[in-house]
Amino acid sequence: MDTLVMIMAGGRGERLHPLTSHRAKPAVPFGGNYRIIDFVLSNFINSGFLHIKVLTQYLSHSLLLHLPRGFNFGSITEHYVDAIPAQQHSGGFGWYQGTADAIFRNLNIIHDERPQHVAIFGGDHVYKMNVRQMLDFHRAKDAACTVAALPFERRAAAGNFGIIEVDDEWRIIGFEEKPADPKPIPGMPDKALVSMGNYIFAPDVLFEVLPADQENPDSKHDFGADVIPAMVASGLPVFAYNFLDNEIPGEGERERGYWRDIGTLDAFYDANMDLRSVQPGLNLYNPAWPIRSANLHYPAAKFVFDEEGRRGHAIDSLVANGAIISGGAVRGSVVFANVFVHSYAEVRDSILMQHCAVGRQARLTNVICDKGVTIDDGAVIGEDLEFDRKRFRVSENGVIVVPKGMVVRKDGSVVEEAISRPAGTLRPRAHTPGSVKGNV
């Protein structure tokens, strides 16, 4: 085997609550058809890496359902995307204590697979990368470890990211966690180098540095905070790979370097809203680099006149299969599968996840509706933030999040009952598209 891929997919994503109240951050729906983890998995498959282990932990049920539905190679047993739940070892270990601890506890997998290289990537970022090019760089440098990195404006990077310091050969000579004054890249005084949290290791190095990290009582057992700095200090050859050098077939300079760490509600919202652009930085329509996901088997989206002759329409929006816009208006929004928008409803700059229903004359502005939300006739969200804060979580930028399965009444009251309703009863009136069973 050439390369074993290990995806870290156990993150709590606490800053994304309530979207992560029922699922791990990598399982959060994104972009109308996808889950966040679909991007890193598609990157590896498109790059020709077909030995992938996904390490899960926090609220993993959704991921455990999603992976075999979207990433099943059938009878080709030498190719796989395997979920690896956190396990209780004989030594009495509890939950993973950090990224390095997670790999340490699964060193047996690396030992059994005997790869030449180990790629350890996060499962909670949205981007496209041809990982083969990073591996070529890693090999050319004969590196013990290579870290994917992206040049940022120093002001934007300050206090927000782990910053890598490199020499003229892009060998890493220092690392700082969220410094107020990031060190510049050689020859680029206005740029700082941000770690993307993606690594390629030589396997023998992992067997050396991870047990040593476990013996350090002061370690948080994290690659970025502990293991990589210790490797640099010991003189091991650790290099940074410039993500701006990465080329995707079918894409050009406009898409180059697109990467979003959607760790907050506002970052999640903005990344979805980016997709409304005529030419977004993340191109979902490139057949040379498809983003794979579970096939939901819904019919095509439908836009229809209601019984009163009002035409349903969507402008500057993404609308997934199975959605029906019946006499309502959707503007600047992302609409997932099996959503129903009724007559005279207005949805603006919002995200409606699967199985949502928006009633007649309801109005939504700057709202994220998690799965299975029902907005009753005449209900209004997004026009009175003070009132909305009493009912929902509101982000720093004023985005309102309606939790999964909630019913919002016209009088402003909310009922947390839809999750427990029988399948197929989430829709008001005559729309009964079938079961709402599926991943969380």
Image: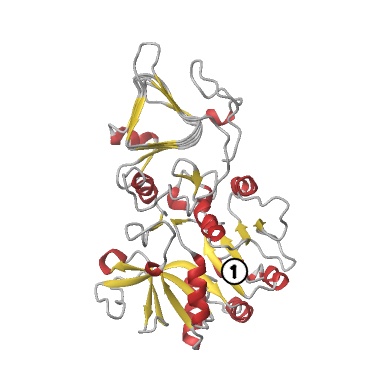
- Who is closer to the viewer here, 179 or 138? 138
Q: Indicate the position of residue 53 as horizontal and vertical percent values.
A: 63, 61
- Who is closer to the viewer here, 319 or 230? 319
**What colour-coding does the image apply?**
secondary structure
Q: Quadrant of residue 79?
A: bottom right
The image shows residue 347, relative to residue 256, as above or below, that is above
Q: How packed is label 1: few (under 14 Cα within 10 Å), some, or many (20 or more)? A: many
The residue where tag 1 is placed is 101
Residue reaching furthest to the right: 90
Q: Indicate the position of residue 402 as horizontal and vertical percent values.
A: 42, 36
Residue at the image point whose x is 64% and y is 78% from the top:
207
Q: Is residue 149 left or right of residue 101?
A: left
Residue at the image point whose x is 34% and y is 49% from the top:
280
Residue at the image point whose x is 58% and y is 43% from the top:
294
* Helix, strand or loop status at disc 1: helix
Q: State which quarter of the image contains the N terminus.
A: bottom right
Residue reaching furthest to the top: 308
Q: Indicate the position of residue 199 as horizontal and vertical percent values.
A: 51, 70
The image shows residue 251, relative to residue 377, as above or below, that is below
Q: Indicate the position of residue 73 as horizontal and vertical percent values.
A: 66, 52
Instruction: Tell me if I can see residue 371 in this picture.
Output: yes
Q: In this view, does 406 lie to the left or right of 180?
A: right
Instruction: Tell me if I can see residue 380 in this picture.
Output: no
